């Protein structure tokens, strides 16, 4: 078997018996997402995982149907272990300390203002779960690394190396493909809450942190965050003391329900405060689409090496709504 020479950033050359990382795919979805989840899994299998056989954990707040489990089990390469879990009640539903009258008033206001998912309780449950609980699920505990996948996403390029091993071997903790601005209406008090946590716990702030990517000159939040529907990251970071205390503090303030704090800004701000900037990694070579945006590889020979089907000229990186240029500048990368 001849393997194509990969001149991209990370050369893996399709090992026949790869040394796998302690890693899994994690997919949170509903039974009604069956067809769209199959499409996402089929793509990641074809573009990457059939050569590796990393396992999958599917999570849901209600049990997956037999049909769901059979259909998903059938698309995944037989090398991969596939598990289906139910989320513990207290990891998903609105906690008792939330004042429901206040939460309801917040939802009604956001609904009236046409904020996306503004009136939804289930969306808030999902954001809080993804912020503070998915990495504590019993089926997930045994893994260190995860790759988050959602129904209806697309992988536009062959991934010719193992991103988990790349992270582990290069001291990376959090990996992303798309960065953008958050809707301010959903996180009105998040930044001030973060600031008060930081003043209570300066000991957790990383010396070469990435706050400079997110903080404006006036000290306010510029709304940049990593889009969390794609994440490859180290769960030991989320499980660690700094992020655990951070999440608990945010959860006590109630903004997951009184406002609509997303797991994307919560993860991103956590990573920006507690990690050194070099621990945050941009995966240029992973062509990725989540409606309505696509990241298409731009660096070196990544697009060619990946046999990418996306149009590099239409990559979200160059969109006015993207924070990519800010990230490149913050990291001191060229082409800005
Ligand atoms: P968006 O990407 O912000 O528009 O939100 P999505 O609707 O894609 O939800 C984010 C992720 O959470 C996806 O993986 C969904 O399948 C999942 N999700 C959202 N709401 C629920 C829910 O109520 N139950 C379950 N089990 N999964 C959900
Ligand atoms: Mn989504």
Image (cartoon, grey):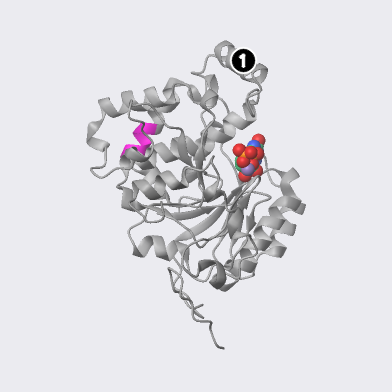
Q: Eyeballing the image, is 126 above or below 31? A: above
Magenta residues, as a range? Answer: 241-246
Pinpoint residue 325: horizontal percent, then vertical percent.
44, 47
Q: Answer whether residue 147 is magenta in the image.
A: no
Q: Residue furthest front?
A: 336
Q: Is residue 174 left or right of residue 312?
A: left
**Principal secondary structure, stretch drawn in magenta:** helix
The answer to whether one can see residue 143 in this image is no
Ligand 1 shown in quarter: top right
Q: Residue at x 40, y 54 (%)?
A: 281
Residue placed under numbered mark 1 in the picture = 109
Q: Eyeballing the image, is 283 above or below 259? A: below
Q: Residue at x 32, y 48 (%)?
A: 277
Q: Eyeballing the image, is 266 above or below 291? A: above
Q: Residue at x 36, y 38 (%)?
A: 243
Pinpoint residue 124: horizontal percent, then vertical percent.
58, 29
């Amino acid at each position: 078997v001849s393997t194509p020479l990969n001149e991209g950033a990370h050369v893996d050359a399709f090992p026949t018996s790869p040394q796998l990382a302690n890693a899994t795919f994690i997919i949170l979805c509903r039974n009604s997402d069956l067809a769209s989840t199959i499409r996402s899994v089929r793509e990641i299998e074809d573009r990457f995982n059939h050569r590796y056989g990393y396992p999958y954990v599917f999570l849901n707040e209600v049990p997956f149907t037999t049909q769901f489990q059979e259909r998903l089990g059938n698309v995944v390469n037989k090398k991969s272990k596939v598990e289906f879990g139910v989320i513990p009640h207290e990891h998903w539903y609105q906690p008792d300390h939330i004042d429901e009258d206040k939460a309801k008033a917040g939802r009604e206001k956001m609904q009236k203002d046409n904020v996306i998912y503004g009136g939804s309780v289930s969306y808030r449950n999902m954001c809080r779960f993804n912020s503070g609980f998915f990495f504590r699920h019993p089926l997930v505990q045994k893994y260190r690394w995860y790759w988050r996948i959602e129904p209806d996403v697309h992988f536009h390029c062959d991934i010719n190396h193992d991103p988990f091993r790349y992270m582990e071997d290069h001291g990376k903790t959090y990996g992303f493909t798309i960065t953008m601005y958050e809707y301010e209406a959903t996180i009105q008090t998040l930044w001030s809450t973060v600031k008060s946590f930081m003043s209570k716990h300066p000991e957790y702030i990383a010396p070469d942190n990435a706050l400079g990517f997110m903080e404006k000159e006036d000290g306010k939040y510029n709304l940049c965050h990593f889009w969390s529907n794609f994440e490859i990251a180290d769960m030991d970071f989320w499980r660690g003391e700094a992020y655990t205390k951070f999440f608990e503090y945010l959860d006590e303030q109630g903004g997951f329900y009184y406002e609509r704090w997303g797991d994307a800004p919560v993860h991103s701000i956590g990573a920006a405060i507690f990690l050194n900037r070099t621990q945050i990694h941009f995966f240029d070579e992973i062509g990725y689409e989540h409606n309505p945006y696509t990241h298409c590889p731009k660096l070196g020979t990544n697009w060619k090496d990946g046999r990418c089907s996306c149009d590099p000229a239409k990559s979200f990186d160059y969109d006015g709504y993207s924070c990519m240029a800010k990230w490149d500048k913050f990291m001191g990368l060229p082409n800005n």
